[in-house]
Amino acid sequence: MRAAVSLLLLMALLAGCSVTGSLFNGDRTTYLYKHQRYHTVEKGETLYSIAWTYGYDYKTVAGWNKINPPYIISLGQRIRVAPPPEVLTSRTDQNSAKEKAWSGNSKKGNWSQKKSKKIVKNRTENDETISWQWPVRGKVIDTFSASDRGVKGVNISGPLNREIHSAASGEVVYSGTGLRGYGRLVIIKHDNIFLSAYAHNNKLLVKEGERVKQGQKIATMGSSGTDKVMLHFEIRKDGRPVDPLRYLPKRSL
């Protein structure tokens, strides 16, 4: 009986290790990315692209590794890409404290609730500081899904080499082909909260470190990293994928 149970556990582990697929179809969903603690910097990678790959905010990853702005990393450098033990311990302590603050009808509990609402309100107001525009003309063929294997943005179809434009002003923090499943990719930092990404391009027209204006041409539509011509467009808030349709103006393409 014990041998049979061990065999089943081994089969389950092997099955978990065999999970594959594009990273944008599941944020840190593969066994490898769920369990990896460190990443060795390869040619063409930036701190932004590494944080994007593992689904964390670049500022968080920088903090774990004591990397200060402008977040310069070097080839072969070992980067922590998962919370260190002290962070996990701190989170546990904070959660316990929050549970105590919210329990009962004490004044402390009421104060914590009011403070939480204020933080949420301020962050909502900050969301509205960026006025987004559609990056390309075309038909939306796939929409955002919060599930593990869901699309972490929107997929927009169109003809080869149609112009792709920056959805908002910002700085290009990645332009290359180093992220598995994204093909030729551009990532733009808009402020300390929001990043946007433009994947599967045919041509990249901007370089890392370049400042771009909203509506500026940054790439042309292609099929790199996928089997059809389309743009995969993502918006990430504090490192986490959010539904672009919540931010883009409502209009038919």
Image (spheres, grey):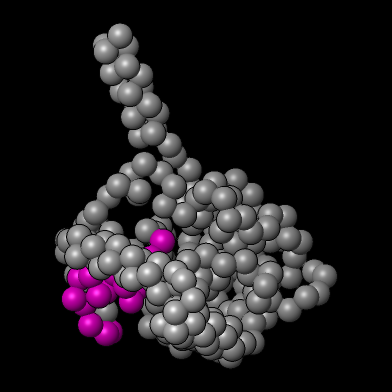
> In the figure, 71 relative to 243: above or below?
below
Residue 127 x/y as whole percent? 58, 84
* Residue 68 located left or right of residue 169: left
Question: Which image quarter: residue 164?
Answer: bottom right
Question: Which image quarter: residue 138?
Answer: bottom right
Nearer the observer, 212 or 27: 27
* Residue 50 located left or right of residue 220: left
The N terminus: image quadrant: top left
Question: Which image quarter: residue 54?
Answer: bottom left
The C terminus: image quadrant: bottom right
**Residue 89 visible in the snapshot:** yes
**Residue at left 68%, top 54%?**
142
**Residue at left 40%, top 67%?**
99
Boundaries of the magenta span: 55-70
> In the figure, 210 relative to 177: above or below?
below
> In the figure, 206 relative to 230: above or below?
below
**Residue at left 22%, top 56%?**
38
